[in-house]
Structures are given as C-alpha cells and as structure tokens.
Amino acid sequence: MVGVRVDVIHRRAKRRSRTARRLRRGCGVTKPPAAPKIYHIVHVDKLPYIIADSCLWCDAEIIWRQTEGTTIGMGSIKQRRLSLPVHCHPGTCVGDYVPFYLCPRSVMLYVIHQANHKELSYRGGQEPIVHLEADLHEVVEWAGQEGRRWAFSLANAGAIYTQFRCCLEQLNQVDWNAIVARDWRAPEVKERKQAEFLMHQSFPWKRVSRIGVKSIAIRTRVAEALALAQHKPKIEIKPDWYY
C-alpha cells in the first residue's frame, strides 16, 4: 500500500510539473474585453463590517485587525499567500493585496458549492456568497491618482509558478478564453481561469459598482446591510454567476 501511495504522489507531482511548464510558456496573446470587470466573493455577513470600514482589507490586514464575519477561503492557501512574492512589486506578497477574479462563477465558488474539500472549513454553500463587481479600468485610474500599487496574475495567484504584471498593456497576456470558459477541467485552463486582479492593502467600498446575488433572500440581506451606507451599489439577482 505504501508503494501505491508513493506512485500516486509521483504521478500527481508530474501532472503539476507539466501544468506549471505550460503556464510558464504562456497562452500567447488573447484580446481582453473592452471594459473588463473584477469580482471579489465574500459571505454576506461580512458586508456590514466592509461598509463600516469603507473598504475591503487584504488578508494580512484582516489577520492583524481580526475582522469579523464568515471566512470562506482555505486557511492553508491564505497562509501560503502571505509569503508568496508579487515580483512586479518587490517586497510585497500576495496576501498584502485584496484579490479579485476576472470573472464571476469562479473555480473557488465551485469548491464552495461542492463543500467537500478537506481544507475548506466553511460548509455553508454558495447561496450566502455575494459577488462585489468593479470596473478594472476605473479602479486602475483611481489607483494611479492615489499612488496605490496594483497587479494582476496570469493564473492562480496562490501558485508558486504564477507570473504577475502591473501594466494594462499586458492584459492581453491573460488567457481570456480560459477566463470565460464554462468547461475548465483541463488543468492549464483551470489555473488560467483563476487569474486575479490585486489591489495593495485595501480596496475602497465606493469603487464597488454592483453586487450580484443568487436569491431574493440574499438580496434582502444585502439591502439591509446597505440601508445606512452612503454608497449603495445596485443589487442584482444573477443566477448565471452561480453553480
């Protein structure tokens, strides 16, 4: 049995190595959307705290501040991201940035929906998860005015082989075909679909332009959280953003 387990581990390591080599080679050039959007997923019970702080915090700040609300990510991956360097901004790590996907209905949301991953402590399913949408170009323009660092990854930002960029002209290096793919079973498609936009330290609540939810019940909870907020993004039921 020990020999069988070792063989399985070796096969998995070879698959990961092949995937990493393909990702390092890149996907060539793909045309980005004219107005790309970015999406942060969060449990609805965190909204009151985000609104009170007027921003979303990066994981490093969340740990330091011990912010309240349900955590939906995997603890081991969050820990690893705290030490993974963002090479285009020397001295910073992935965990120093607020992460956004480049599409709704992300791979991570599927993991949450399945609720069977051994490293995922959250078991509440996808319904309480809301999508906070923002316009990538508008956010980058704001960051430039404020002197804020930002970046994007070409694949899963939690992987050690991922490459980072910090120039809008390089958005065509993202595999936009993978970003919009509904069938992402191929390992390299799965990794590239998880490309992220990253904003250093915090992300202003006022830059959230829309909130996508799965059900009327969650829309009601979001509306209640927004009741006293100065900035009120529009709330839409978006079943196509969910599994």
Image (tube, rainbow, N blue to C red):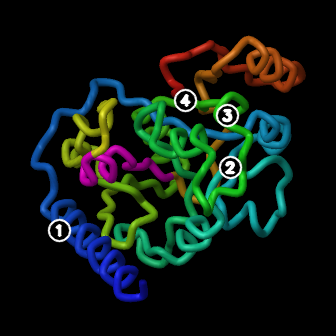
**Nearer to us in this view, 92 or 45:** 45
Do the residues bearing badges 1 and 2 touch, measured as CB atoms within 8 Å? no
How far, Cα to Cα, is label 2 from label 3?
A: 9 Å
In the image, residue 196 lies at what x, y percent? 42, 49
Q: Secondary structure at mark 3?
A: strand
Do the residues bearing badges 3 and 4 touch, measured as CB atoms within 8 Å? no
Residue at the spot of label 3: 129
* Mark drawn on residue 72: 2
User: Is 147 on the left-hand or right-hand side of 204?
Assistant: left
How far, Cα to Cα, is label 3 from label 1?
A: 34 Å
Eyeballing the image, is 108 above or below 77? above
**Nearer to us in this view, 151 or 15:** 15
Residue in the picture at 53% in, 26% down: 242
Q: Quadrant of residue 160?
A: bottom left
Dot placed on the residue nearer the N-terminal end, 4 or 2: 2
Residue at the spot of label 1: 21
Q: Which residues are magenta?
A: 186-198
Q: Is residue 189 magenta?
A: yes
Dot placed on the residue nearer the N-terminal end, 4 or 1: 1
Q: Secondary structure at mark 4?
A: strand
User: Is 52 on the left-hand or right-hand side of 83?
Assistant: right
Three-letter amino acid code at disc 3? Ile
Do the residues bearing badges 2 and 3 touch, measured as CB atoms within 8 Å? yes
Residue in the picture at 49% in, 38% down: 139
Q: Secondary structure at mark 2?
A: loop
User: Is 67 on the left-hand or right-hand side of 241?
Assistant: right
Residue at the spot of label 4: 133
